Amino acid sequence: LLWNKLRHYARQYEADQRYDKFISLSMDDPSITPTEKCRFYLGITLRDDTKARPVPGIMQIPGGRYAVFRHTGSYSSLHKVYRSIYEEWFPKSKYHPQSTFSFEMYMNHPSTTETSELLTEIYIPVIRK
């Protein structure tokens, strides 16, 4: 499982004691880009800790205004949430999606949480109309 590989990798750099949440970044839209060419990153958020060993592969998420959506349940239904956001929420809102990447933050872990209780926050960069 990809999650476990990431946790193992984090342990090698002593980051496992500093991480807060799992996070994923999708760089492509799977409804446009063929699945095999979609870029997806899985990572962990790190708490500030200046004394810890540096961790390779750090990516900083740009600051700015984000619309945040909360999903409870299976990850397999996240695509429905995105469709609702883009087809229903954006047309009715005072915002446009910004051209930078969105990301998901996993508030709990599938190994310790029932699938129906998994909590995911979706962050989409926005600009006001």
Image: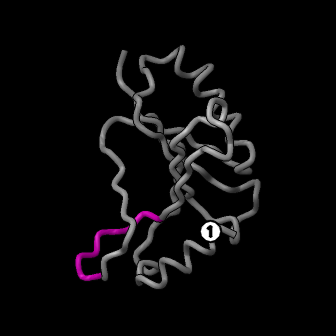
Which residue is pictured at 42% across the width and 20% down the height? 95
Q: How is the image coloured?
A: one colour
Choose between 117 and 55: the one closer to the eye: 55
Which residue is pictured at 61% across the width and 19% down the height? 88
Q: Residue furthest left?
A: 50
Q: Which residue is mark 1?
A: 3
- Dominant SS of magenta comes to loop
Q: Which residues are magenta?
A: 44-52
Image quarter hosting the C terminus: top left
Whether 40 is drawn above or below 56: the answer is above
Where is residue 61? Give x, y as percent.
36, 50
The answer to if 110 sits in the magenta stretch is no
Three-letter residue code for mark 1: Trp
Which residue is pictured at 24% across the width and 82% down the height? 51
The image quadrant of residue 115 is bottom right
Which structural element holds mark 1?
A: helix
Where is residue 26? Give x, y as percent.
54, 45
Whether 30 is drawn above or below 54: the answer is above
Which residue is pictured at 52% across the width and 55% down the height? 41
The image quadrant of residue 112 is bottom right
Q: Classify mark 1: residues with Cα within 10 Å, few (<14), some (14-19) or many (20+).
A: some
Where is residue 23? Give x, y as percent.
51, 57
Whether 122 is drawn above or below 125: the answer is below
Choose between 62 and 85: the one closer to the eye: 62
